[in-house]
Amino acid sequence: MASMAVKVWVVLMALVVCAGVGLGGADDDDGGVAAGGGRIGLSSPPNYHGALAKSILFFEGQRSGSLPANHRVKWRGDSALNDGQAENVNLTGGYYDAGDNVKFGFPMAFSVTLLGWSAVEFRDEVAAAGQLRYLRSAVRWGADFLLRAHTSPTTLYTQVGDGNADHQCWERPEDMDTPRTLYKITESSPGSEAAGEAAAALAAAYLVFRDDRDKSFATQLLAASRSLFDFANNYRGSYQLSCPFYCSYSGYQDELQWAAAWLYRATRDSKYLDFLQNNQGGSSNMFSWDNKYPGAQMLATQEYLAGRTELESYKRGLDSYVCAVMPNSGNTQIRTTPGGLLFTSDSVNMQYTTTAALLLSIYSKTLSSSGTGADTVQCSGASFSPDQISSFAASQVDYILGDNPMGMSYMAGYSSKFPRRIHHRGSSIPSIKALPRKVTCNEGFSSWFPTSNPNPNVHVGAIVGGPDGNDQFPDNRGDSTHSEPATYINAAFVGACAAALGQNQLQGPMGDIASVISSN
């Protein structure tokens, strides 16, 4: 499953190439992937330009609410337009996290944070690819929802939709008729993880928008971020006690560090630096929607290497993470498949691959520009230079895009060989524009979920859960573990792909995205 053993349902996300989509022609952005498998050669790396564009486009296909006139994913329509009405609040908009029709605020906020980080850290690369306005739009769509969800200093709505009822239905978001139950955290029922992540997301979004001519939006973002951090910190309590889904297993200390690090970067307010200094500790070999320690350590390490803080312990924690994920480091907890893909268990979850690729890309860049002379990471069995770290990060991007034993891209709509039956409701049922009648819950399960036919809509840019530990991928809609995409997989990939694009300094043809995004 896309989440870390928390999701107990099936989610569906599928891709299909319908007639006239044009994914097999000579101008296709196949990224140099041979039809028989494996990359053609080092002289022909993947088309990072096209992959970056499509990874950002994916978020438009995940939108909830009233879609704007310039919406590019034509098989989607308006959905969930009354969210929040039960409590007289406006909770429209935001993102469906994967292939279902529920809005989960905790992983949504993490996705927004990563998108914001990518827009800040790799702004030049994204801008050079002509994708900055689309990335900013993706950040804003999620940030707007988080602003609306924070209805008072001690209230944050964390979920819209009854997860159990939703997961017993297989219907398009546009047909949705399951309960839109509201869940929230308050001072009497806190969830420091969810509030802290939302604070981090809005601080990252502030950094994206603070230089805009219209300062009002950025001001609103920063004020809400500060408020959410205070809520998370002053009313400490684990989301584990009140969450219906996406419960936190790592506790809330990582989210508090993560939020404080983002707010310090955004404000230079000593309050947040003091928090980091007084709340050190914690480590993890995984960076995910649940565990933010490596991300917080990355932000704190950037400040430390720039000479602005004395937070050396955060760098030690980050180095430990690097040693865990780099191959041949002497650490055997995290392994790679025979084809070279990072995995944490027998079931590869692409989330950990893409987040590792993002962090390694940022750390390599940070070490190279630090000027401290100490630019290698020392592990028990090896040491790694910035170039080695960035090369391994790029290899993970390359694997996802087709440099793997299956010779297939794990991103929908990229290359001529990619998953056709991803686990995603909206893409597995014909568009409401092609089939305007209501498709009921039961019809979805009986007619569209079990079919072996490819999905009728290409969810361009969606990255699935990935192959198994032996590099095999069954392309089975019912196999949610391997076939489900999620926003937090793509959000991390955006920055990792932008970094790979910058390293290769390639601006390859993006391909005819307009023809791919409309499959009806």
Image (cartoon, rainbow, N blue to C red):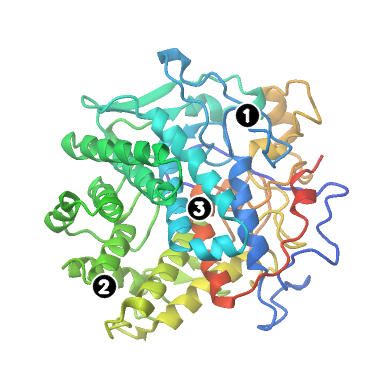
Residue placed under numbered mark 2 in the picture? 305
Residue mark closest to the camera, 1 vs 3: 3
Q: Secondary structure at mark 3?
A: helix
> How far across and down, in percent of the image, does residue 204 sit?
38, 50
- Nearest to N terminus: mark 1 or mark 3: 1
- Determine which quarter of the picture holds residue 284: bottom left
Q: Residue furthest left?
A: 278
Structural crowding at the residue carrying mark 2, measured as other residues with C-alpha within 10 Å and reported as few (<14), some (14–19) or many (≥20): many
Asked if the residue at tag 3 contacts the one at tag 2, i.e. Cβ–Cβ closer than 8 Å, the answer is no
- Determine which quarter of the picture holds residue 503: bottom right
Instruction: Give the residue displayed 21% in from the left and 24% down from the top.
Output: 188
Residue mark closest to the camera, 2 vs 1: 2
Residue placed under numbered mark 1 in the picture? 173
Quote the CA–CA distance across marks 2 and 1. 46 Å
Residue placed under numbered mark 3 in the picture? 491
In the rendered structure, the answer to whether residue 269 lies left or right of residue 173 reads left
